[in-house]
Image (tube, helix red, strand yellow):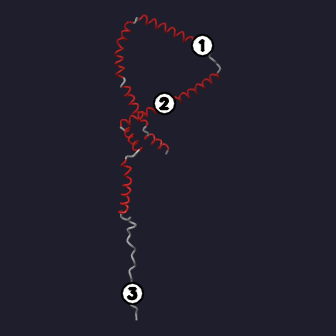
Amino acid sequence: MAITDDLRKTLTDPTPLYFAAGTADLAVQQAKKVPALIEQLKAEAPSRIDAVRNTDPKAVQEKVTIQAKEAQATVQAKVTEVLETFDTDLKKLGESAQDLALRSVGVAAEYAVKAREAYEKVAEHGEQTVRAWRGEAADEIAEIAVAVEPPAEEKAAPKAEEKNEAKAETKKPAPPAARKAPPRKPAAKKATPPAK
């Protein structure tokens, strides 16, 4: 029974549809920004191309070589430092591994919560988008206005309705149980004259 309830709940929950609608709406909003970015790239492209053409390949090669040597020296220094300070105590390594595992579980839980919040936020945006597509936002405002103060016609209408109901009750035919024929009286017996 629980599986059926879970399936029913899953199939009737509109949140994934709202999430999809919200994602689509956000994608459309981002797509509207693309033409401006393309124009910006068109404007900047000639100056960047000229800068690349005017650079000396030998200067670029020397700069890259120097950076690569510095990176290699840094990596070698870090590796030797780590190897020198490497603790061979297995107990400490086990504790470190356990601590790392617990931290990763905590981080995973935190990311799961953040992902759920982001999912709900996009789903809420999608629900608002769907309402806007349907025009339900205006309907809700009208419903709230009616709930706050009903129109004057509705205030006077109940009295007239009550009078009409009272008249209708008096004119209604009696229910079938009340329409029974009156009970019959037994037929009178003919009296016979007394014998002499």
Note whether 91 is above or below 47 in the view shown.
below
Q: Residues within 10 Å of mark 3 (few under 14, many from 20)?
A: few
Q: Between disc 3 and disc 2, whose residue precedes?
A: 2
Q: Secondary structure at mark 2?
A: helix
Note whether 33 is above or below 67 in the view shown.
below
Task: Give the residue at mark 1.
Answer: 81
Q: Is residue 86 left or right of residue 44?
A: right
Note whether 32 is above or below 77 in the view shown.
below
Residue at 38 percent across and 26 percent down: it is 30
Toward the viewer: 113 or 62?
A: 113
Residue 170 location (% of width, % of height): 37, 63
Q: Which mark is residue 115?
A: 2
Toward the viewer: 89 or 32?
A: 32
Q: Is residue 145 left or right of residue 104?
A: left
| Measured Cα–Cα span from mark 3 to mark 1 | 139 Å
| Measured Cα–Cα span from mark 3 to mark 2 | 103 Å
Q: Residues within 10 Å of mark 1 (few under 14, many from 20)?
A: few
Labels 3 and 1 touching (C-beta < 8 A): no
Q: Amino acid at mark 2?
A: Ala
Task: Give the residue at mark 3.
Answer: 191
Residue at 37 percent across and 24 percent down: it is 33
Q: Secondary structure at mark 3?
A: loop
